[in-house]
Image: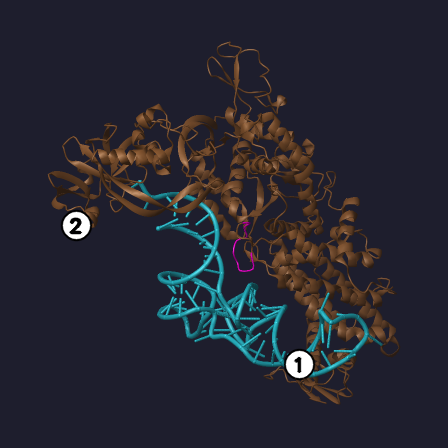
Chain colours: A brown, B cyan
Amino acid sequence: MQLPKQYNPKESEPKWQRFWEKEKIYKFNPKSKAEVYSIDTPPPTVSGKMHLGHAFSYSQQDFVVRFQRMLGKNIFYPFGTDNNGLATERLIEKTKKISAKKMDRKEFVEICLDTLKKELVPEYVSDMKNLAISCDWDIFYTTIDSHCQKISQRSFIDLYKNNRVYKKKTPIMICPLCSTAIAQVEMEDVQKSSTLNYIKARLDSGEYLIYATTRPELIPGCVGMSINKDGTYVKAKKDDEIWIISKEALEKFKDEWSLTFKEELKGKDLVGQTVTIPLTKAKKQVTHDQESKTEYGTGIVYYCTYGGAECVEWMQRHKGIKPIHIMGIDGKYNSFAGKYQGMDSLEARKQVLIDLEEDNSLVKKEQISHVVNVHERCGTDIEYVATEQWFIKYLDLREQFLKDGAKLNWYPKHMKQRLDNWIKGLKWDWCISRQRFFGVPFPVWYCKKCNEVILPKEEDLPVDPLKDKPKIKECPKCKSNEFIPEKDILDTWATSSLTPRLAIELMPENIQKKLYPMSLRPQAHDIITFWLFNTLVKSQLHYNVNPWEDVMISGHALDPKGKKMSKSKGNVVEPQKVIEQYSADCLRFWAAGSKLGDDLPYMEKDLITGKKFITKLWNASKFAIMHLEDYKGQKPKKIEVIDRWILSKLNHIIKESTQSFTKYEYSRTKAEVENFFWHEFCDNYLEIIKDRLYNPDQRGKEQRLSAQYGLYHTLLAILKMMAPIMPNITEEIYQLYWSKHEDPKSIHISLWPKQEKSEEKAEKIGNLAVYAIQKARQAKSEQNLSLKSPLKNLIIKGKISKEDFELAKQDIISATKTGHIEYEKLKEDSKIDEEVKIEL
RNA sequence: GGGCCCAUGGUCUAGUGGCUAUGACGUCACCUCGACACGGUGGAAGUCGUGAGUUCGAUCCUCACUGGGCCCACCA
């Protein structure tokens, strides 16, 4: 058979993609009795094209899925996209140049759905297919479709009925500029310079507390003054006034403020006193708070509604305190802010500082630099405002979640710590409501009269309360017939935490039982605390069971210098271009180069190595197929010792790579097979058997058949073991020859090579032969001779018997081109195991 | 501040309580050997981050430190 001289991935890869699709190679078979292996595929957020990080982690999960498929399992490998969140909303606003705020929600949602369906999702899926991801593309969901909306809403109703959700007025983060609630993930840390203001507040005793704040403008919202009861404070004389600050603060400001020390006191002596806040003249209690530190500022802090997360927490610790809501969701101060009404924080700050100065209450302004949370989109400082929000109650279950997390099989193990860490640090219940436009609506109406919550029946889901009316005629409580729809939408995580159900419920009910809990959740480490945890929570709350058995956590793709890739840095590598230039197999080869969980810098040299590997595989296969043309799969009566040697070595590789792959250590499998193929198989084995293959007249027909046998089985096993990593080139070679002799119509549904017994004796003989051949090569190389130049004499000493040596003798002669060969058996107790002498 | 990971020839990386520490890229010399010059053979290159401990013996185990990365919290 005449094979093309070169392998052309540009032709080959699309050809096999079409083949796999047409032949339904990756199709889940609901009727099969084989063991099911189900994957909770991460639904990527479709905000543009597939990026390198996706290519990296989806390749890694695809390696293990392909391996499991080759173990003969029935693979349930769905694909979904996550489109219900903010990312999509923003992308559509940007690309379509529209504003959700300024238009009808219905209309906006229509545009989003349409763009997703026609443009974003198809392009993304096509990228995934080009990468040879082996999902069953017919099992497809997108988190905004009605199937997903239904499941998401059902989840909410279920939790509501089990008293696991509640609604509460509580502070949330808002962006005053965008006039909307935002989530933690939408925040960014920025180092900003700011002013720490020292302000004087009069105690009823006539003495003054000096407190420090970067948010003086919140003075109308002040709810309390706090100190640390265990801290040491001092009274100091300032002109004719007595100032109270912490001992540390006195050290700092003694000279600057011309203070004279008067007496020391404990923080607890201050607790319970009443203090008058300047400007507003409001009277507040001095209380203890564990977070008040004597070393910061003056050791005295005022708390407002709301200066930041710490104020929110303070309010929670001090139950009796009533918040004073001075700000609306637009960030503007309301009537509770008195003369500052209508201003935003920046304007108010200026005015308050002027007023404080006039009031003679401003002691000092200090320039500081601190970290501020800003909205990543517009850079505006985050504000906290109290609004009505829906929560899932789960803080009481933390202990249980820790135990559930421990029951998962973690790959790699240490990633579990991140989940534990997160669960232990949980302080809030899970806020699932968002004041946004594009997403899954809450399936809730309220009775206009008595505010009773009205829920739809499950069979009526999904509903959009803004469009749909409740099916019931009147409120079951007060008989009123007027209802108000809930306008909020569910947070994206409330839906994506249901991905196992979203996928499984695409199957008939009798199949669903086989699929849950799922076998594997593959994902990257950055969202363990969100996606992994949330999915665990929902599964436990709904079904009392973990959603999966194994979790496989992959790392990140980094730029060549080991830095994060980001558009703003301009160091982004586009996987589409890499595939175009090198092929999907090369990209996957690179992705297989990192240990599971490790980050991996993108290095062009690794792509080149992959390309060379493909070429080598192609050339070696070309050679093999050429010599296997007349081979009919028969087993020779006697297998030559060198052939038994390679088969025995192969067995070790099969054993190790199977073990590695079972533990999700695809990088080891790749490295082991790569090394075995290149150095053992090509460099040694192929060179040794060439003579037998080319010259059966001299070496014997049976001896040639033995070489063919070794060649056939070893290369086939190598191809199979590389197939999960490089599905295209291995399929190409398989189809050129092996598919005509083996049953499965694709290498990807062929069975993973089985480990057979190793032959220790054959290995010893073969190893000695290879050692002798290497010595001969070395001798020739040192003399700058060609490797085909003949040797005069080759004397080999070793511990194998003379008879055993005879078995490999002819192969050694032909591989070294020696004119004469001698063998001497070393004594068992000899210090050296082998020795080779060469005469050129 | 809490937690986790990493540190091995110029670069990236494998690995193990003990034999000359893996491989790739690069580099140097040679070789057109009937698959492959995107190749082959051979060579040079590493005190396995620093310090201490456990041990007969540590690159591997323990502790501390230094540097890099990640996650979480974050200071009025």
Which residue is identified by label 1? A799
- First in sequence, mark 1 or 2: give its number: 2
Q: Which of A405 and A7 is in front in this view?
A: A7
Can you say whether A669 is above or below B42 in the image? Answer: above
Can you say whether A89 is above or below A63 in the image? Answer: above
- Label 2, secondary structure: give it: loop
Q: Is residue A172 left or right of residue A656?
A: left
Quadrant placement of the N terminus of chain A: bottom right
- Label 1, secondary structure: give it: loop
Which residue is identified by label 2? A255
> Disc 2 sits on a residue from what chain?
A
Can you say whether A287 is above or below B45 in the image? Answer: above
Q: Label 2 near label 1: C-beta < 8 Å?
A: no
Q: Residue A565 in magenta?
A: yes
Callout 2 crowding tier (Cα within 10 Å): few <14, some 14–19, many ≥20: few
The boundaries of the magenta stretch are A559-567
Q: Which residue is drawn at 19% across and 48% down?
A: A256
Q: Nearer the viewer, mark 1 or mark 2?
A: 2
Magenta: main secondary structure equals loop
Q: Is residue A15 left or right of residue A539?
A: right
Q: Residue A500 in magenta?
A: no
